């Protein structure tokens, strides 16, 4: 009988890697400090009736692969039945070899459902039935799925206008197996050129109970929402930007630019960048005041296909890697905050792998010894969270910084079945260390290297974010 594709030593190529993974990495709880899970589903412990609903809905990674294979949109985001959509995904999977989707698909089937058969057209019916039966069991509700993966903390992502009602509901339930927090995502208040900008300001003003007619009142409204998020346990912000803009400005200039936009006039590029610089500096200084961590996801070229965007909306699979210049403005932004002693803990993520070394060296400019790993080079993100992308990010950080201070992996996912990506990451880094031990490039000191692995997988993030300790999770030290 042949060994299943997903087996105990998957991706582990020697005995050192196996020991590091099985004895040190595998049992560490998961802190998923950036994801897009739906708080409603967590708060109400949603039970998904079939695998399509929990696995294919909202997953634009899968959608892009299916479209490439020629699958009709009816079976992706259209009105086909859930079973028909799953069948089309099953048909696609064998063609995804060498794409990370192939590994993720089979890891997820194995970990959540103990399914070790390869997903193909031939196995689709049986796997759909098997997973549906299991998903209808109480221990495979949303919380059950998270508990299976030893998830200690999830941090969702919300707009400043969000009421956080589901975070409040979940906090009141005092669930012993999971801590759910949020991150503050104010991009819509920053992107002043958006067609819907003035409409958004009305919604933000209503949420903050402040009429936004000036830049000063916009800052007051954002501060009010930061205070509200903070009272509801928020410790992080997040920004998805092409790049960090940086232009010198005066307060009077910003008020004039804001007034010009409110009057319906188009802004010059320089004016937009001045405004964005001003509001980002205000936000970053406020985050520092509240002791938050700020995250910047840089380099996505979004919504490329305008025809499909008009039909399906954003976040449906029409984004790619951008080639923006990152270094100089980012340096000016961080330096301005540091010069005021108002640079809070910061995580920088790049989507263009050409920027790996830029960010890996940039963080060293502002790690001032005040906090371990104060400025972080974030894990491989989006198109880069696969084996090759993980290795390149880890190697850049290792060569130019201290990998031992790294806060590790996150899912950035909308799916409750995505948490084996943490296992995937852990196996990859254990194999990297194991290979270098075998080649004599690192000492055969498994105990010390195992500690570094555990720090990267869990301990560094626990210290960095200071989320509440969950006593029900197993922590291996």
Image: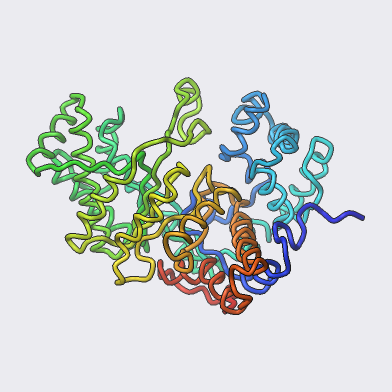
**Which residue is painted at 22% across and 30% down in the image?**
269
The correct choice, above or below, for 462 with respect to 170 in the image is below
**Which residue is painted at 27% across and 58% down in the image?**
287
**Which residue is painted at 61% across and 27% down in the image?**
78
Decide if residue 81 is on the left or right side of residue 302: right
Decide if residue 120 is on the left or right side of residue 147: right
- State the image coordinates of residue 319 (x, y, percent, origin top left): 48, 33
The image quadrant that residue 254 belongs to is: top left
Q: Is residue 159 visible?
A: yes
The correct choice, above or below, for 304 with respect to 133 in the image is above
Decide if residue 95 is on the left or right side of residue 263: right
- State the image coordinates of residue 159 (x, y, percent, origin top left): 36, 46
The image quadrant that residue 405 belongs to is: bottom left
- State the image coordinates of residue 181 (x, y, percent, origin top left): 43, 60
The image quadrant that residue 298 belongs to is: top left
Taking the view exactly as shown, the residue that stands out farthest to the left is: 252
The foreground one among 190 and 409 is 409
**Which residue is painted at 74% across and 47% down in the image?**
132
Q: Which colour scheme is used?
A: rainbow
């Amino acid at each position: 009988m042949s060994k299943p594709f997903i087996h105990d030593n998957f991706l582990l190529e020697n005995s050192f890697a196996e020991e590091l993974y099985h004895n040190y990495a595998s049992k560490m709880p998961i802190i998923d400090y950036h994801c897009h899970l739906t708080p409603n589903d967590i708060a109400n412990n949603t039970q998904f009736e079939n695998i399509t609903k929990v696995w294919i809905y909202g997953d634009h990674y899968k959608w892009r692969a299916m479209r490439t294979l020629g699958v009709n949109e009816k079976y992706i985001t259209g009105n086909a039945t859930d079973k028909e959509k799953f069948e089309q995904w099953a048909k696609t999977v064998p063609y995804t070899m060498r794409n990370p989707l192939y590994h993720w698909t089979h890891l997820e089937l194995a970990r959540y459902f103990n399914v070790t058969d390869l997903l193909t057209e031939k196995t689709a019916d049986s796997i759909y039935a098997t997973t549906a039966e299991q998903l209808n069991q109480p221990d495979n509700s949303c919380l059950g799925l998270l508990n299976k993966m030893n998830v200690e903390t999830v941090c969702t992502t919300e707009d400043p206008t969000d009421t956080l009602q589901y975070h409040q509901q979940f906090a009141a339930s005092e669930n012993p197996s999971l801590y759910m927090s949020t991150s503050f995502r104010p991009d819509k208040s920053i992107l002043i050129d958006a067609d819907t900008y003035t409409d958004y300001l009305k919604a933000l003003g209503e949420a903050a109970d402040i009429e936004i007619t000036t830049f000063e009142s916009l800052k007051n409204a954002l501060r009010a929402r930061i205070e509200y998020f903070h009272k509801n346990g928020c410790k992080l912000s997040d920004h998805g930007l092409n790049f960090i803009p940086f232009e010198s400005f005066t307060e009077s200039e910003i008020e004039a630019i804001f007034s010009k936009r409110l009057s319906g006039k188009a802004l010059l590029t320089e004016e937009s960048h001045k405004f964005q610089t001003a509001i980002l500096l205000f936000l970053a200084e406020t985050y520092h005041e509240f002791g938050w961590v700020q995250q910047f996801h840089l380099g996505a070229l979004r919504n490329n296909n305008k025809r499909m965007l008009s039909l399906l909306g954003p976040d449906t699979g029409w984004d790619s890697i951008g080639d923006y210049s990152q270094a100089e403005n980012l340096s000016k932004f961080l330096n301005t905050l540091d010069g005021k002693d108002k640079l809070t803990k910061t995580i920088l993520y790049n989507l263009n792998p050409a920027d790996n070394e830029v960010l890996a060296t940039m963080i060293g400019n502002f790690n001032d010894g005040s906090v371990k790993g104060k400025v972080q080079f974030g894990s491989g993100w989006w198109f880069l969270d696969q084996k090759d992308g993980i290795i390149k990010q880890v190697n850049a950080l290792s060569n130019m910084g201290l990998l031992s201070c790294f806060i590790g992996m996150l899912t950035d996912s909308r799916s409750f079945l995505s948490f084996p990506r943490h296992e995937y990451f852990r196996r990859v880094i254990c194999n990297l260390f194991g290979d270098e031990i075998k080649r004599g490039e690192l000492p055969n000191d498994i105990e010390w290297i195992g500690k570094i692995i555990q720090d990267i997988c869990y301990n560094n993030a626990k210290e960095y974010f200071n989320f509440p300790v969950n006593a029900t999770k197993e922590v291996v030290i």
